[in-house]
Amino acid sequence: MSKNITITAMLSVLVVVLFSFQMVIPPIGMIFSYLSVILLIEIKRNTETRYYLMSLITTSTLIVMLNDPFGWILYIFMLIPVSVGVIYEGYLKFLMLIPVEAGAYFMFKVFSVKGSPIDNFLGNIWYFLGIFFYIATYFFYKKAIIIFDVLKKRMYK
């Protein structure tokens, strides 16, 4: 039990630190924030479901306290639902498209500055952007899990 708590705590803190790089170094930090959720998937794969849920709650709370509103939307509405869709099979995979669509709506329709032609264009196609983000991120996380497993096998060989 203490091993599971230790793994969960260490990886959860690492997720928050990696995700918070998006505020310090924006271009590189976005890559780190996109990759940080893979550690949550590893928590679910290596521990029980209750530790995974505990890590989701703690990382979401810490990110809400430490980041800006766009970071909240990116993490809670766009990255976490895709990772849940990767882990769980069945109808939950398709149900997780709803928060991603809500995140795309907030990012491109609600919080955008009106007036620019690009903002108007993105505001009109926010639903396509949400679907594309979900599909692209879903398959990226699936491939990242495979690569992570191969690296783990080579390390412990």
Image: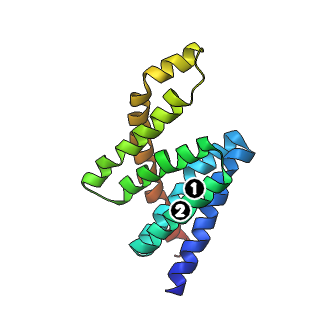
Density class for disc 1 (Cα within 10 Å; few <14, some 14-19, many ≥20) is many
The percent position of residue 157, horizontal first and vertical second, equals: 52, 76
Task: Say if residue 133 shows up in the picture.
Answer: yes
Q: Nearer the viewer, residue 53 or 131?
A: 53
Question: Which residue is found at the position 40% from the left and 44% from the top?
Answer: 99
For mark 1, what is the residue?
36
Q: Residue at x 67, y 46 (%)?
A: 22
Q: Residue at x 39, y 30 (%)?
A: 127
Q: Which residue ends up furthest to the bottom in the rendered image?
A: 1
Q: Is residue 135 left or right of residue 108?
A: left
How packed is label 2: few (under 14 Cα within 10 Å), some, or many (20 or more)? Answer: some
Residue at figure coordinates x 31%, y 51% from the top left: 93
Q: Is residue 90 above or below residue 11?
A: above
Dot label at residue 156: none
Q: Is residue 22 above or below residue 63?
A: above
Q: How is the image coloured?
A: rainbow
Q: Is residue 125 above or below residue 19?
A: above
Q: Position of residue 12 (x, y in %)?
A: 58, 66
Q: Residue furthest right?
A: 24
| Element type at mark 2 | helix
Q: Amino acid at mark 1?
A: Ser
Residues under numbered marks 1 and 2 in contact, where contact means CB atoms less than 8 Å apart: yes
Separation of disc 1 and disc 2 at Cα?
6 Å
Residue 114 percent location from the top left of the image: 58, 18
Tally of marks: 2
Along the line of sight, which residue is nearer the eye, 42 or 5? 5
In the image, taking residue 90 as reference, residue 139 lies left or right, namely: right
What element does badge 1 sit on?
helix
Q: Residue furthest left?
A: 90
Q: Give the amino acid at mark 2.
A: Leu
Q: Which residue is mark 2?
A: 39
The x and y percentages for residue 117 are 56, 13
